[in-house]
Amino acid sequence: MATIRRALLSVYDKTGIIDFARTLVENGVMLISTGGTFSVLQKAGLPVKQVQEITGFPEMLDGRVKTLHPMIHGGLLARRDQDAHMQQISEHGIELIDLLVISLYPFEETVAAGATFGECIEQIDIGGPSMLRSAAKNHAAVTVVCDPADYDSVARMIVDHGDTTPELRKILAAKVFALTARYDNAIATFLLEQTESSGGIPAHLLISSEKTQHLRYGENPHQPAALYGSFFDAFDKLHGKELSYNNIVDIDAAAALIEEFDSPAAAIIKHTNPCGCAIGESLLEAYSAALTTDPASAYGGIIALNREVDIELAEMLNEMFSEVIIAPSFAEDALDILRRKRDRRLIRLLARRPGPLPLQVKSVRNGYLCQMADAEPENPKAWEVVSRRQPTEDERTALEFAWRIVKHVKSNAVVYTDNRRTLGIGAGQMSRVDSSTIAALKATNASLSLEGSVVASDAFFPFADGLLAAVKAGATAVIQPGGSVRDEEVIAAADEHNISMIFTGTRHFKH
């Protein structure tokens, strides 16, 4: 291996840079630096040259131009194995740069902090990405570091061998291009959001996300899988086995449902579908009611709660096997009980969703589908009672409750409830009548009466038969989007059976 002789260091994030630079100096490496990094290294007593000493040209335009110079990029890009390159380097008095250490201006953090447009623009790094890309392209000869986490491995190799291995340089170069791709993505997304008026759907779909965790497998053991992005900014795993692909999908679905409620609430999820949901005066009451909807399906499910889990509830939760329990907090004595199940995952929901979810993206053959999340708040005041009979106060409360739940059930979805808990759920059937029949059967199996219940349908009843199935089961009120060419037929059937029916005008298909 060759020897690293000259290094250029220019970092916004100064974490660990003094110790790393000191190691370089102790191993005979000459340091070049810019601006704030130069000041930090000089203050630490390390020998370092300013970039302008190398380029013979001062920093200008408030620091916008300082490293964009042939004396820098020539030193980074010159191929050491090309005689013509080395001859030109010699002719122009350019010295080679063997190691580049860069961290970029914090553009994403500035945007996230709510800075002005002008402030965000000033945090777009130009020189940093340019140098990174030059060094990464020439990684056959140049070591490039864009992450302080790599300082130790690079330092050890320099101490032991004077240089880094080709394998490490290739890995570091790949990290650079992943970083600059994400950086450019963030800038492009920011600017597009300022200029586009397409209902939140971008003209260019830009996705760049770092792998957070390699997963044992995907939906099935033969499918490789990984988690990307900042999922664990919203969820904190306190106990249990590593999360699986299916766990993560279910946790996301469970959190979305439980966030519908301000009252103490419990939801039990199985394969992203609710198999029980309830509100109560206490979390224990809500969980007990949710469990009665479909106790057989609840076994091995995901339990989501929107209040702290106390010891009394923990003891009840421990009576049934569950894969995951999610809550905003757990009392310490409750945690002691729940940790007795070694493999069960305990997840802390760190914060309620602050606003609309980001774009939902799904891959299809040769492309992607993109949509805004179905997360707009409901507006019951805009709903229309289309039947002759107005809903009673209890029925309206129950209908609002049922409508919050049905949007989280796979289509075709039919949900029977009273005003505090689910009674029967029919999910994912090809026929809405079948969904209604399954929901009623679930209620019967759980010994729950549907007499006086209400029913919610995620989409309109295309024929009166779906409504008649609900009437036969015992429902007295219906909530649905409306919009069928046979709406009048369905309304007539509701009036004939003295059913109160609300049209919401909003469909909640969930595929």
Image: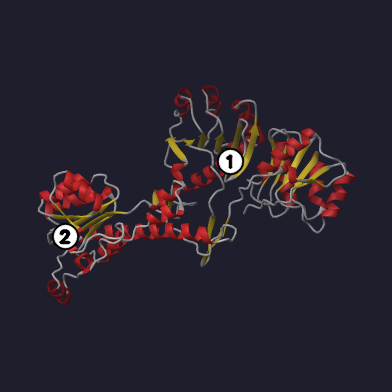
Inspect this view and state whether residue 216 appears: no
* Residue drawn where x is 53% and y is 51% of the image: 358
Q: Which mark is residue 140?
A: none
Amino acid type, callout 2: Glu
Residue matched to label 1: 269
Residues at marks 1 and 2 touching, judged by CB atoms closer than 8 Å: no
- Cα distance, mark 1 to mark 2? 64 Å
Q: Secondary structure at mark 1?
A: strand
Query: Is 295 placed left or right of 232 in the picture?
Result: right
* Quarter of the image that includes the N terminus: bottom left
Residue matched to label 2: 53
Nearest to viewer (mark 1 / mark 2): 2
Query: Is 487 placed left or right of 288 in the picture?
Result: right
* The one of 135 and 104 positioned closer to us in this rendering: 104
Task: Point out residue 367 in the picture as x, y percentages from the top left corner.
Answer: 52, 65
Mark closer to the chain start, 1 or 2: 2
* The one of 33 and 258 positioned closer to us in this rendering: 33
